[in-house]
Amino acid sequence: MTRHIRHAAAFCALLLVALLVNAARVQVFQAPALDDNPANRRQAIARYAQPRGDILVGGRPVTGSKDTGGRLRYERTYTDGPLYAPVTGFASQVYGSSLLEHAEDGILSGTDPMLSPLALINDLTRARTPGGDVVTTLNAAAQRAAYTGLGARRGAVAALEPATGRILALVSTPSYDPESLSGNGVTVGRSWAQLNEDPNKPMLNRAVRQTYPPGSTFKVVTAAAALDAGAVRDLDRPTDSPDPYTLPGTTTRLTNGNEGCENAPLRVAFERSCNTVFAKLGADVGVADMAAAAEAFGFNDTDLRIPYSVAPSTFDTTVDKAQLALSSIGQYNTRATPLQMAMVAAAVANGGQLREPYLVERTTTAHGATVQSAGPRPVRQAMHPSTAVRMRALMRGVVEEGTGRNAAIPGAIVGGKTGTAQHGVGNSGMPYAWFVSWAQGARDLEPKVAVAVVVEDASADRGDITGGGMAAPIARAVMEAVLATGEGGPRSIGGRWR
């Protein structure tokens, strides 16, 4: 009898070991695969069992959560959804998330370990940490001014605080309401299909994910490169620039949309946006120095994040002299996002120093305690300080005497550069209207805002008048909004956001 008991006990022990081994296999080794299995709804149910944290603009939430009473209980809501869509992105129970909703998902969903100092206890009790908040750098008035200014036209606006790199406005039109993608009903699928099939691409973030030929706004980079390289030493000395200018090694003749460009001094050429002068300057400076200047401003940077990724702006470093001449006036293969061109204007405004742009001021717990703050941003020297002084004078001349008069603000110092970018086969496409600028209030010690505006569907009769007529008024409205607030955006005052 004893022998049979021992055998039964051994068999039971063997079964227990097998059970433990299988449990370990399922709960440890196979856990990741089971978690990711589409048939496993537990994670989704847990994820949407509590409200999501909010994204804040000017201390006020522009997102929220709605209790549906369903299994996936809380759906995302948006205040002024189309206005802030290029910043927030969407958080969908079916299609995932994008932009800030994706980049800061750990904070917003409550899964970031930094939100809970007692994460182990939460694991044992199966408690969930409430979602935290994301405080943005946006200036609400500037954001609305940009959105209103663009209206029904396709285009984008990016605005920065030059001294810090804080993003004050980021707008892309046409836009969409992210709330239409929040739930999991039939209407969500229809909305997704309609948005993706829309030829105007409302979900495309044109401010940071679309690159354009920057046209004559790139002449800011070319002028800075020429001054740094010593190709131009006197802003008012005539340049050796024929009109028309024959591109090096070709029989192609480059002309201007304005008169008075032959041998024009740099100051006059900048105000009149003379293609011939800047094409020849770029060719004289050379590929190496032009590429170095462009990259100092941020071109060819594939790692920029704000915190979501930004499409790299490009300056071709493999060009011949004729192609370099065209690249130097913002054509050929030169491409830029509106954010990149705002960075160019910001570097001029900030004495030649370029601060890396950022969109998140800080993240907090649900109770307001700071989890992480942005802190000082990396800085690069885009040009010599003396060059920046002269570039500011050139940009002021465009607004006061040249093609950018529509950007002038009474009582403020404003610098700008207009641009019209040709594109399409044989330049047959509708020109893109550009304007880049910066502004300094009468009582300010330094420029407070730098702006880039691009309008895709702008009509034009000639040259840079498009940028001055279509894009400059939008930039002016954004700059006025920032200067009127007296600050770039929300600041912490006595622990409260204002």
Image: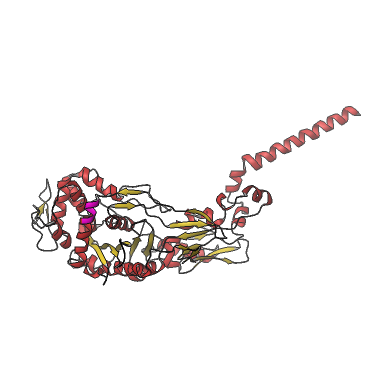
- Residue 145 image position (x, y, % from top left): 36, 70
Viewed as shown, does residue 169 lie left or right of 79? left
Viewed as shown, does residue 6 lie left or right of 369? right
- Residue 454 image position (x, y, % from top left): 29, 62
Viewed as shown, does residue 336 lie left or right of 136? left
Q: Give the quadrant of residue 20.
A: top right
Q: Quadrant of the N terminus?
A: top right
Observer-nearest of 149 and 411? 411
Q: Give the quadrant of residue 417.
A: bottom left
Instruction: Please name the residue shown 38% across and 47% down the image.
Output: 303
Which residue extends farthest right?
1
- Residue 30 image position (x, y, % from top left): 62, 41
Q: Give the quadrant of residue 151.
A: bottom left
Which residue extends farthest top?
3
Instruction: Please name the residue shown 24% across and 44% down the image.
Output: 317
Q: Look at the image and say whether residue 370 sits in the magenta stretch.
A: no
Q: Vertically, is 453 above or below 303?
A: below
Q: Which residues are magenta?
A: 385-389
Observer-nearest of 214 and 399? 399
